Amino acid sequence: MSLRVAVLRRLPLVVVWHLISEGVGLRRSRVVQVFETALGHAIEIAIRPPDTVRTIESAGPAIAVALGLPRVRVSQDGSRSDRVTIWLDQRTNLGVVPFPDIAHPVGIPLDALRDFPIGVDDNGEIVKVAPYGQHILIGGNPGSGKSVAMRVFLANLAASRHVRLVGIDPKHAELSLWRNRFERLVLGSEVGPTLDLLEALLDEVHRRAAYLASTGSASLPPSAAFPWFVLAIDEWAEVGAAGDSKERASITSLLRRYLSLGRAVGCTAILCTQRPTSDSVDVGTRALTTHRFALKCGDRYQAESILGVGSFSPEQLLGAAPGRALWSSGGEASPLQFFNVSDEQVPLLVNAGYR
């Protein structure tokens, strides 16, 4: 660390900003407030023309160098165009964040239609999703935290009423811990059991579609008669790997039909893979997923195979703790640190849905 950076870090941020703002071309700005964040500090400034949020963003790298920081982020106030917040991150990620003890309360299971807490953003705010009727895709290199992400969704689902879990786990790994909560679980890559499960799920989808047609209804919320079916696949690229080309094509076709038709009738899927490449991630199937999470990937091409082209910028692909991901639900990707569900929490969560 240079002497200049060391001196700047000892000064109040209001003073620091006055010292560096002229050097980075933002002399017309004024400090509104300074506050601590989960990753460091932030400065809210008032700007005047010709400065804009884009001007501030372009100055970000220079600010980071001036303060010796690994990253500087910029965001604009949604209610005022002249207010910009500059996030001075002394760390680039939050590390391991324990899963909050909220998914297995004493009493009855939770409402399946609630928002699921899945992690925190870079500002330390809890991120929630409401995944009923939506498919999920999770991908990242080995060791990136795919199991961390999968556990968060299983924890929320296991603690919910009117949820039936079925799964395919070619590696006999992550889903085995939850097997008592699964109604049906295929362990291994044998083709026969995999085809049987997918065909049974598609039959269930057709049964529900026929019911909706007979009642004239357009929605089917979770109930005892029509629970929410969730198909969890721990390694998508290995499903049906033991079969021949015709059998693998059948599995791909059945899965895509399930994803295409099941969403409207309460039958969804969580697809995970540690081989996020354009060869292993079927583009047609990926297009049917709503929430896509790219964990640490080898390069931007692997991330694009999960998120799609143009949904993120290369500088967002920073190395991080397991469970950190870029999340896109159709638009621009945003960073997320998944909660960590410990081994000790799993048995409690497995039984929570039966209370």
Image: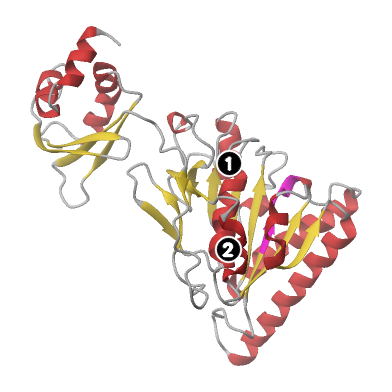
- Asked if residue 233 is among those painted magenta in the image, a careful observer would answer yes
Report the disc number at residue 348: 2
Q: Position of residue 11 (x, y in %)?
A: 13, 21
Which range of residues does the magenta coloring cover?
231-237
The amino acid on which the numbered mark 1 sits, given as a three-letter code, is Gly
* Residue on which the image places disc 1: 145
Location of residue 285 with respect to 141 vertically, above or below = below
CA neighbours of label 1 inside 10 A, class few (<14), some (14 to 19), many (20+): many
Q: Earlier in the sequence, mark 1 or mark 2?
A: 1
Q: Quarter of the image containing the N terminus? A: top left
- Left or right of 272 on screen, residue 3: left
Q: Which residue extends farthest right?
A: 244
Residue 218, disc: none
Q: Secondary structure at mark 2?
A: helix
Report the residue that reaches farthest toward the top. Answer: 3
Instruction: State which quadrant residue 16 falls in.
Output: top left
Image-quadrant location for residue 355? bottom right
**Residue nearest the viewer, comparing 284 with 142:** 142
